[in-house]
Amino acid sequence: MYKDSRIAVVVPARNEAGHIGGVIKSMPQLVDDIVVVDDCSDDNTSDNARATRDPRVTILATPAQSGVGGAMVLGYRHAIELGADIVVKMDGDGQMPPEYLHCLLDAIIDQGFDYAKGNRFLAGESIKVMPAHRVLGNIVLTFMTKLASGYWQVFDPQNGYTAVRTTVLASLDLGLLRRDYFFENDMLIRLNFQRYRVKDVAMPARYGDERSEINLFRVGVTFPVLLLRKFFYRIIQKYVLRDFSPIALFLFLGMALFLWGAGLGAYLWARTIITGLPTATGTIMLSLLPLILGFQLILQAIVLDIQESPK
């Protein structure tokens, strides 16, 4: 127990035989239950977890390779059955320092947040040890996740060191969550629908000899598309279907005007290049005015969406 709350840690693991034992042994005593979810490993991940002989450990196995999201959904459901009050996600590769676990819990128990997550960028030294391609990729994905999720104060969305109230999990349809590495991003988007409060917690990065299975090229191609789709899904769900807001009106009208202005401007520019004939000022204004007005409406929609972000 920690401050009268039962704590469960879910450890999704695939081929982590070399690290899972150390992760379990380093788990603080404040943790009541450790749920290791073996996602169809090809090595001795489950055996090594069992060899720790920690009485808090429960080992689950996915029926088929499910990805980190699928493993977490299985672990979340089991933690709810165990009667946990707060569930922490800690990966099986040893990258997440257990000595900072209480910081996530304090954000929920003492500060009243519903969901807490690590942020490696709040810990100054972490940026120095983080590979450059991860820093750049994280910055791009962070902005797109802010746009898609509506949590504009959140940074480092790919950080999987998280804690959440089980009451929050019980209110979500866990079966709809993404099963792949888009899991954390999708979780934020669904939390925003119900206006749950999310807290970023400073968390140093720790890298060792673990090998990531993330395909950076695939992530770079698929994540922007998924985030764009989720952005429009959130806007329609939150500001049209659930509670109509001028945010949706400003956004869609602004996009229509902006695209019209940009399209007409491109056509006029190309026609001038091909024919060599100048375009009349009035015709140029037919492109320029919708372009400016559309941009202003889109900007206003974003400002209002930022104000709507749960604080």
Image: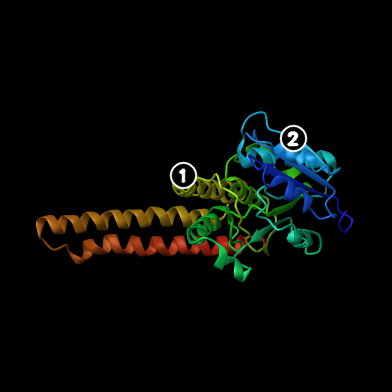
Seen in the picture, residue 201 relative to 74 is either above or below; the reply is: below
Mark 1 and mark 2: Cα distance apart in space: 29 Å
Task: Quadrant for residue 18, please give it.
Answer: top right
x%, y% of residue 117? Answer: 67, 57
Secondary structure category for the residue under label 1: helix
Residue drawn where x is 76% and y is 48% of the image: 24
- First of labels 1, 2 by sequence position: 2
Seen in the picture, residue 192 relative to 284 is either above or below; the reply is: above
Residue drawn where x is 64% and y is 33% of the image: 40
In-image side of 62 versus 284 (left or right)? right
Disc sitting over residue 228 in the figure: none
- Does residue 173 show up? no
Q: Residue furthest top?
A: 63
Q: Nearer the viewer, residue 44 or 3?
A: 44
Q: The residue under label 1 is which amino acid type?
A: Arg
Q: In the picture, which quadrant includes the C terminus? A: bottom right
x%, y% of residue 284? Answer: 23, 63
x%, y% of residue 178? Answer: 60, 41
Residue at the spot of label 1: 218
Secondary structure category for the residue under label 2: strand
x%, y% of residue 290? Answer: 34, 60
Residue drawn where x is 78% and y is 50% of the image: 25
The answer to whether marks 1 and 2 mark residues whose Cβ atoms lie closer than 8 Å is: no
In-image side of 9 versus 145 (left or right)? right
- Does residue 122 show up? yes
In-image side of 278 versus 126 (left or right)? left
Q: Nearer the viewer, residue 86 or 112?
A: 86
Q: The residue under label 2 is which amino acid type?
A: Leu
Residue drawn where x is 42% and y is 57% of the image: 254
Residue at the spot of label 2: 60
